[in-house]
Image (cartoon, rainbow, N blue to C red):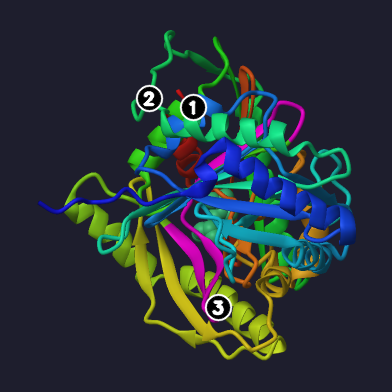
Amino acid sequence: MSVIEKPFFALESAYQLSDFLTECYLAFRNNRHPRLVSIKFPIASFNPLAILQRFHGAQHHHFYFEHADDCFVGLGKAIQLTVESRDRFAQTRDLITDLSSQILSVDAAGTVQAITDSRFFCNFSFFAQGQTDTSQAAILLPRWQVEQKTSSDQPAAWAIVNIVLHPDFIPEAESQRISQELENLRSAKSVLTKPVNAITATIAPQSTSTQVQFKQSVTNALKSISNGQLDKIVLAKTLDIHASEPFDLISSLQNLRDHYPSCYIFSATCGAGKTFIGASPERLVAVQDQQLKTEALAGSAPRGKTTQADQKFANQLINSDKEAREHQLVIDFIQQQLSKLNICAKLDEPRLLRLPNIQHRHTPISAAMPENGHILDVVGSLHPTPAVAGLPREIACQHIPHYEDFDRGLYAAPIGWIDTQGNGEFAVGIRSALLKGNTARLFAGAGIVAGSDPEKELNEVQLKLQALLKALV
Ligand SMILES: C=C(O[C@@H]1C=C(C(=O)O)C=C[C@H]1O)C(=O)O
């Protein structure tokens, strides 16, 4: 009879964990290095939303990010930093590089790892300046990073605890806490608890007047386009809703996951009891092992109710000069910005990206990252692309606040993560909403170029808003 030994994970015993943390602490006291310790524990596969439901609290930081087979939840904070500067992408890069050099990573057996799997979650505001409510950049190294990869050959799940050493650190107390928290994570049920009361929501009364306003803005923007000030501008609209109960974050995210499985599903706390959530179809940039992926996503049409109607919309989208121009501006811009960073972009065949409520023109773009390139330099150079701002970019960004009477905040801005090796992934924070208690503000926009029709652009924005509205109530 063969005996399968359970692997021995020394640091799962609070006693040995305490010894290990004492060693780390003494080293830190002597030479102040390392400042951060990360320990990676194996865990059974889990339902990420059940973990989030069990451990996120109104006062706690969380970050949820799911795309394709990679899903992770950040709970609590080890380190949280904000950057208020025009140079926010470079500063974020430098802060993360500095923090990365201070991490000692071990596995659950206590073996030092050459590479840490800890990730820094980052979100940025759309504008670098001028709008007040949101930090220009926020970085979170969570207390716990719970991650799952479900690719068929090697499904894996783990929980990483990030520990900050400081002069008053008490290893015994900390090890007790970690053991307890790990136990809690492992025993979290996979089943979601449904909200007791169904939510009924009302749309804020000013919503109809904002529709008229939006069409007026499009008409005015078209004048700036025809007099040569702009080639394109992306104008957004909000929809404010009030509910009978506080919005249920978990049900909303579950709805988004169910309806938009190909999208980035995200949720991030952003202070003052607010949470930013969304289901974005748009990748800003992903870097994995020096391979970069980005895309142009611009030009939209509704989905048809029948196959024929759907194909008719698709054909209109493919054959329309206006949609082609709107899309090409984004491709050209991305290529130019990448080439300024010595990155030579390769375009894939254009295609349609079909979501349940809308379809888009889509061109995947890939490239090799230069040796010393950094993903945040790419993020800083691409954001905002003409898919969410316009062209010329600076002029479009100056015009947008004159047309929109709200703060874009995190809407249409980069949201994602980076690790210590320079891998990372950022989505464009569109198809998104800001939740606070019983209120939610939904955001959506549309690209305006010569030939745009205000009525059609309003319809497009309404379609996009529906995606979120249906998920919330
Ligand atoms: C600006 C948004 O979407 C962007 C605008 C699109 C368009 O105008 O066709 C298409 C995809 C996105 O790049 C949004 O959804 O809010």
Q: Which residue is drawn at the image coordinates 65% and 89% (left, top)?
A: 371
- Expressed as whole percent of the image width and height from the top left, the position of residue 155 reads 32, 56
Residue at disc 3, secondary structure = helix
Residue 56 sits inside the magenta stretch: no
Q: Is residue 78 left or right of residue 319?
A: right
- Residue for badge 1: 53
Q: Are marks 2 and 1 in contact (CB under 8 Å)?
A: yes
Name the foreground residue: 116 vs 265.
116
Q: Amino acid at mark 1?
A: Gln
Q: Earlier in the sequence, mark 3 or mark 2?
A: 2
**Badge 1 residue CB within 8 Å of ligand 1:** no
Most foreground residue, 38 or 254: 38
Q: Position of residue 98 (x, y in %)?
A: 80, 66
User: For residue 351, what is the image quadrant?
Assistant: bottom left
Circle 1: element type? helix
Up-down relation of residue 124 to residue 274 (above or below): below
Relative to 357, residue 473 above or below: above
Q: Quadrant of ligand 1?
A: bottom right
Q: CA distance from mark 3 to mark 2?
A: 42 Å
* Circle 3 crowding by C-alpha within 10 Å: few under 14, some 14–19, many from 20: many
Percent position of residue 189, x then y: 37, 26
Identity, as a three-letter code, of the amino acid under mark 3 = Ile
Task: From the top left corner, tell me how far across and down residue 361 is, in percent.
Answer: 42, 67
3 or 2: mark nearer the eye: 2
Please state the extent of the stretch shown in magenta in the rendering.
Answer: 271-300
**Residue count near mark 1 (Cα–Cα under 10 Å), binned few <14, some 14–19, many ≥20:** some
Q: Please tell me which residue lies in front, 418 or 6.
A: 6
From the viewer's perspective, tell me whether residue 381 is left or right of residue 359. right
Q: CA distance from mark 1 to mark 3?
A: 40 Å
Q: Which residue is mark 2?
A: 192
* Residue designated by label 3: 331
